[in-house]
Image (cartoon, rainbow, N blue to C red):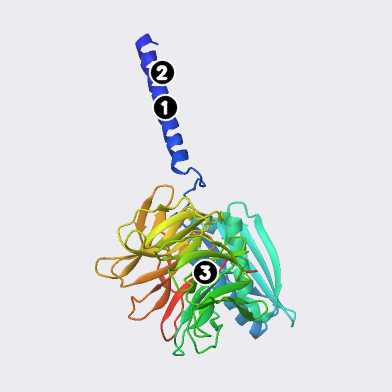
Amino acid sequence: MNLNVMVNLIKKVLFLILQIFVIFFYTLTLHADNDIYLSICGTTAKRSDIAIEHFNVTDKNENTIKLAKLIKKTIKNDLILSRYFNIIQVVPETNFKEQLFSLRKRGIGILITASVSDDKCNLILEMKVIDVATGEIIWKHNYKRKHSIYRYMAHEVSDEIIRRIKGEVGIARSKIVFVNDSTRFKELYIVDYDGYNLRRLTKDNKINILPKWSPDGKQIIYTSYLYNNPDLFILNLTENKRSVISKYQGLNVTGSFSPDGEKIVLTLSKGVYPNLYMINTHGDVLQRITENIYIDTSPSFAPNGQEIAFISDRSGYPQLYIMNISGKNVRRLTTNGPCDSPSWSPRGDKIAFTMKQVRGNYDLYIYDLPTRKVTRLTQNQRNNENPTWSPDGRFLVFYSNRSGRGEIYIIAIDGSGTRKLVEMPGTSCTPSWSPILP
């Protein structure tokens, strides 16, 4: 090789190494004293085609046939809502090899089959997931559940199929809590992630607002005017009991659980400026985090438990900030207007929030921490507020009055696939998405 060519090649390699080093050093400096965030996203990937057969019913009981159809419908809907799959309905054939050959020709890689029976006390569901290319069973399992929880059994199946095929967390066993005023008062309601099994949680004939789930899904905190002051309550769903955990005079609002479920960060005013405090689940103040003449509110824990996103008007109008749980290392995230309702993603790389537009309405945005890129999800659809994340970090639930009244919607984090959660009278607002429930 010519000497000059070799020298130039060496220079280019050294320059490339220097560039990589500079980028690496800059990344470390940018995130000094903080975690390095990994950007992970996945709603826009190509969907896989999978086939699902009619579920076989062994005992031909009329009720079992009905439940088998409902189970299949629920599983199919779960898989469609996951946005991982295109579902192809097929009819079982007597010649299994010919059926597999036909599916392969159509480019289908997975076949789902099931058999349902009834032992008079329980439904028994035998599930199989088959690799079309080889005819081998990828996964099979027998479920045995009470008739009344057939939907939960279907959600179990859906989550396991997603885990087996995609290696991802399924969210079919999650729920959403929100506020609705159809009784003329603001009460808490809970519903499955797909809009089924709507249930009222409170019957206070008072104002209950801003519910948030605990990390284990067993408790919900919320602010209530039950005693004519905005106190923070905790509702134990397992025991169906609730208690007041923070009742200082003035604001006790917008609480957020730490990832370990042992602490809560909230806004307390105590008759002066609203600042952020850390309390335990018994209401004991562990720490005052901010101490300003400004309004600090809407805290949201990072998944690492070491940082908090929050809203403050210290710059002159409400803006999005991050700080350590000690209250130090406060830094403002660059946005273009008044912000509200930050929600840290379960994967740790993004913060969803709302931002006010020139015309006065609010839209949903996502701040990507690794790239500092801000993505707008809604536009020209009136107000869109209070986003919280699905357990897998791929969807947001939020409030919108785009229909003329406040309702709850779900949207993918790429801004597509918006769907209304549930139809009910009145105005609904401030939703919170649960973790995966047992």
Separation of residues labelled 2 and 1 (CA atoms): 12 Å
Disc nearer the start of the sequence (1/3): 1
Separation of residues labelled 2 and 3 (CA atoms): 58 Å
- At horizontal 42% and vertical 86% (from top left) the residue drawn is 425
The count of marks equals 3
Q: Is residue 97 visible?
A: no
Point out residue 229 in the picture as x, y percentages from the top left corner.
49, 81
- At horizontal 53% and vertical 85% (from top left) the residue drawn is 227
Residue 85 vertical placement versus 231 (above, below) = above
Residue toward you, 271 or 100? 271
Residue 283 vertical placement versus 201 (above, below) = above
Identity, as a three-letter code, of the amino acid under mark 1: Leu
Residue 18: image tag: 1
Point out residue 375 in the picture as x, y percentages from the top left corner.
36, 56
Q: Quadrant of residue 69?
A: bottom right
Residue 10: image tag: 2
Point out residue 234 in the picture as x, y percentages from the top left corner.
59, 75
Identity, as a three-letter code, of the amino acid under mark 2: Ile
**Nearer the camera: disc 1 or disc 3:** 3
Separation of residues labelled 1 and 3 (CA atoms): 46 Å
